Amino acid sequence: MTHRYVLGLSAFYHDSAACLLRDGEIIAAAQEERFTRKKGDASFPRHAVRYCLQAAGIAPSELAYVGFYDKPLLKFERILETYLGVAPKGFTSFRMAGPVWLKEKLFTDRDIHRALDGYEGDVLYAEHHESHAASAFFPSPFAEAAILTVDGVGEWATAAFGVGRGDDFELFNELHWPDSLGLLYSAFTYYSGFKVNSGEYKLMGLAPYGEPAYVDVIYRELVDLREDGSFTLNQNYFNYLTGLTMTNGRLFGGPPRVPESPLTQREMNLARSIQVVCEEVLLRMARTVHRETGMPNLCLAGGVALNCVANGRLLREGPFQQLWIQPAAGDAGGALGVAQLIWHRYCRQPRAVMPERDGMKGALLGPEFSPEEIEACLASHGAAYERLERSGLLRRAAELLAQGKVVGWFDGRMEFGPRALGARSILGDPRNPCMQAQMNLKIKFREGFRPFAPSVLRERVSDYFDLACDSPYMLLVAPVKQDRQIPMTAEQRALWGIDQLNVPRSDIPAATHIDYSARIQTVTRETNPNYYDLIREFERLTACPVLVNTSFNVRGEPIVCTPADAYRCFMRTHLDHLVLGPFLLDKARQPDWKESGDWRREFQLD
């Protein structure tokens, strides 16, 4: 039987990626950053493409089709029209962007054919939000569903909604540039001293420490929000049309926070306020989509769909019975979307729907390494290790976690998307009240306020959280069950802002945020048998079916991809142990780690 392969690409803005389909099935997908070790790498995804082709064992000449996730000419049209509309104020911005477009981004077709030496077919282009919509609907477990995509901006659209049925979908309506919920949230990310397109997670995690003190002024001065969820932004307060920054310094009576300077109550209140507004906009959008489509289920994609706090509210308070969120909801997922759009719409191929399971294979779509490859890497570093059979390895790892050790966990195929899901993870005991601070400061080298997620056995999720559905991709936030919460004393309630961090909130304090919420990952044996059985073994020892799970990296670094990446991160940090495939490593037994220079300068802080 001759197979047909479709390669999807996203590149040139942020988070470049490649995805390969074989007869419509997702075979491989990965972000370029994982190979180059540059967070959010926007360059052409040469390494990701090479990996995808190697995973399938094919050459570029064997590709049936190649697709690109947006339309560069339409995007350049928007940049030109924006400049002409605000000229001469936007000249500095255009002077920097224009030459890059004229030299590189308008010649995507040429660059793709050069990179895919031997591919002689056409390059097919989809609109940006079509790619997002395809990535949301086609892999979903729904035969038909409403679709909502929300991000910064594609060509002109900043949000879109429509309906998917069977083998195709249709988008009915769009919100257009410069009115963008993604850019509004990013403006507050920038204003709070965090990096745009990277620090939005921080803003979401910081929000519970603050009060919604600025909500009224946001609605009065910045956002004209309508009942249907559409809105207009007051561009007098923003700088992304004419300048090189997100805001112009007129917001809230002062300049943006200087990155890495101490956080104040102002930033906490700003984070809480914009999170409240973001949730309200999404709820109104969802109600409109439900009213217009009549569908019981909703598929979500676009960068704003990674706001798992808003997703949790949408699930609890919104009009839809079920949600499905693309795990690579940002631009990386556009590579997957355009590939599936080509297969189902251009090639008119039927879609196989699995009601109990989506088509993402747990998002475990990246590279994996054989025991022989891992052992060769360890030998090259002179590492001390022991090889264990599966049951013994799981038992030892669970015992170490129960003893309060922090374990790096490298197993099977790497995750596609921004979340570590039990393949490239750092794990800890959620019952330990010191675990969050220890992992943040000694291992991740990041701000202590940032919460960690619990991985819980799917069949036990309702015993710990107010959640009764799957959350395999860590994209839903829900409250910890009330009978597991620890009420705060009057003295503790009087604490303000960051001082609340070290007050235990539940019997799994390391995985409970200060508002008694958690960003939940449900784990099944079908998707990730080793990780599932590790949690089962931990439950056998402790009666707790939950582990703290954070991504295997340090601050500013992409998630580790290779055994060498994992060993390097292990040795640079205060991780106690490392599981690399069938091998277990003890930090105390490793040779001295030496590097020239300060490795902390290697990664740009987010």
Image (cartoon, rainbow, N blue to C red):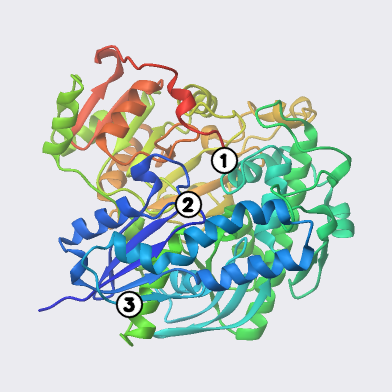
Identify residue type, mark 1: Arg
Q: Mark 3 points at which residue?
A: 122
> Looking at the picture, how far across and down is residue 561, in whole percent?
32, 41
Q: Mark 1 points at which residue?
A: 484
Q: Nearer the viewer, mark 3 or mark 2?
A: 3
Foreground of the two, 230 or 493: 230
Above or below, 406 relative to 339: above
Helix, strand or loop for disc 3: loop
Mark 1–mark 2 distance (CA, rounded to whole Å): 21 Å
Above or below, 387 relative to 324: above
- C-beta proximity under 8 Å, tags 3 and 2: no
The quarter of the picture where residue 231 lies is bottom right
Residue at 25%, 35% (x, y): give it. 563
Above or below, 198 relative to 308: above
Residue at 51%, 26% (x, y): give it. 445
> Looking at the picture, how far across and down is residue 559, in whole percent?
40, 40
Q: Which of marks 1 and 2 is nearer the N terminus?
A: 2
Q: Nearer the viewer, mark 1 or mark 3?
A: 3
The quarter of the picture where residue 242 lies is bottom right
Q: Which of marks 1 and 2 is in front?
A: 2
Q: Which of marks 3 and 2 is nearer the N terminus?
A: 3
Mark 1–mark 3 distance (CA, rounded to whole Å): 57 Å
Mark 3–mark 2 distance (CA, rounded to whole Å): 37 Å
The quarter of the picture where residue 50 lies is bottom left
Identify residue type, mark 3: Asp
> Looking at the picture, how far across and down is residue 570, in whole percent?
34, 26
Q: Name the residue under label 2.
A: 474
Crowding at dot 3, Cα within 10 Å, few <14 / some 14-19 / many 20+, comes out as few
